[in-house]
Amino acid sequence: MCPRSARFHYTFSEADILDAGFLAIETALKTIHEHKDDPEYLELRWNPKLKKNLLKIDEFAQTAAEAALKVRLPDAVEIRGEESSLEDLTYRLEVAALLDMVDGTDLLERGLWNWCSAMVLFNRQQVWASLIGMPNREIYYERFSEAGAFVREPRKAESAPQIQTVTVKEKPDIRLQDASIAFYGQKPKSLLTTVRHGGLAKALDQIAQEAQAKRDQPDAPKFRIYNLAGNPMMMQLIEGKIDAVIELSGQRCHDVIPGFAIALKAGAKLFDWETRNEITTKDLPNMLASPKNKFKYVMACNEQLAVEIVDVLNGA
Amino acid sequence: MATAYPSVAANYDVMSAPVETLSRRSIRKLAPDQKYAKARKVTKAEAKKIAKEGSAKILAETGSAELAKDFEKTMIRILPGSVPW
């Protein structure tokens, strides 16, 4: 155990940390909604420190969230993110934060909906809280001390915000041929990696043939596949709109871990498809140690479907 | 001010107090939904801190005073009072 952990736990409670997370996500969402229709904020700008092009709105949202965290958790938060730094964490401060305040920048830029503001707050031993703010201003979250996952609806007037428990919709009998699958395929390389995967291509071919053969029958496969994935689609999995999210070539921590943490607590099943190992919430702190880590995974609404997809990807 | 802290004023109504007058300990005592309702509020002073912190970062990273000022103005406009959506 870290020798300074006793002092760390004393300084800020889990509630303080979650509270700071809410403020950061709300501030980012407000910043995005303030500027998302202004073309000036949707132009790429060169950031000399990060040596990459960023949208002004991306830079503003990330900076706003970082500033909110630093104000609520003064001198206690070590921040990493796609728009700040992906260096390994030192854990010298009480809380580590991994942020991606515009996850799906290209979609926001085009006025499409599958973006979110995502954050995970943690230390070496545990994930304190994960939060995902959606375009409609709902905030999905989980916290260390509670077993479940929750959604906080946008507040109306001065009343307290409505908080509801969310659980993955039960679909005990669903099989791949009737499932809705999402994968990240917006860039040519990731799209081609997925569609050219031997096991998956074979399974899709079989489903296509069966759909053709049974096209006028009630038991024709209902399979659908969408090339949008990551944190926002994991929230759609919780809501029962998607049955599985798969990633064949690997996505970085900030693109997946907030969604992993929330969906796992909501009841989703998660596997590393290459090793076939199940991933649980206990594995997340280790996965977060290096924000550059990439993960190849299958997340599904139940274990049976997850295992079926893992088998397909491994050519079983 | 004694009335600002429930621990020294047993009958003090925490929920009716402005959050900026509550100690961290008294905020922790609130039930979760009450806590979010109270702690969500951002005071003008806190909004200014966020604006200054962020604009300093933008200035350091981009060297653009204009961009930093724009960020600061945005924060001051959208944050104080944490107006419900």
Image (cartoon, rainbow, N blue to C red):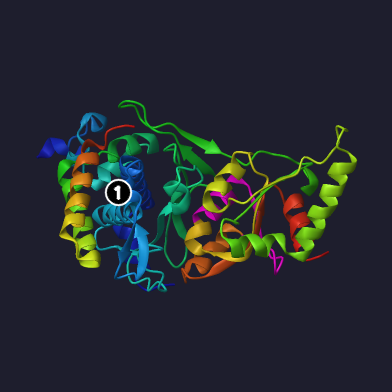
The answer to which image quadrant residue A310 occupies is bottom right
Q: Which residues are magenta?
A: A258-279
* Residue A49 figure quarter: bottom left
Considering the numbered disc 1 on the image, is that residue within a helix, a strand or a loop?
helix
User: x and y percent of residue A114 in the render?
Assistant: 51, 45
Q: Which amino acid lies under the numbered mark 1 shown in the image of this protein?
A: Glu
Tell me how many marks there are: 1
Please report the residue visible at 44 percent of the width from the left and 53 percent of the height from the top.
A105
Residue B77 pos. (x, y %): 20, 40
Q: Is residue B56 above or below residue B14?
A: below
Q: Chain of mark 1?
A: A
* A273 magenta-colored: yes
The quadrant of the rendering that contains the C terminus of chain A is bottom right
Q: Position of residue A184 (x, y in %)?
A: 59, 56
Residue B59, magenta (yes or no): no
Quadrant into which the N terminus of chain A falls: bottom left
Q: In the rendered image, is residue A272 in sight?
A: no
Give left or right: position of B10 versus A257: left
Residue tagged 1: A40
Quick check: A149 left or right of A109? Answer: right
User: Is disc 1 surrounded by few (<14), some (14 to 19) or many (20+) residues within 10 Å?
Assistant: few
Residue reaching furthest to the right? A213
Q: Residue at x 34, y 32 (%)?
A: B85
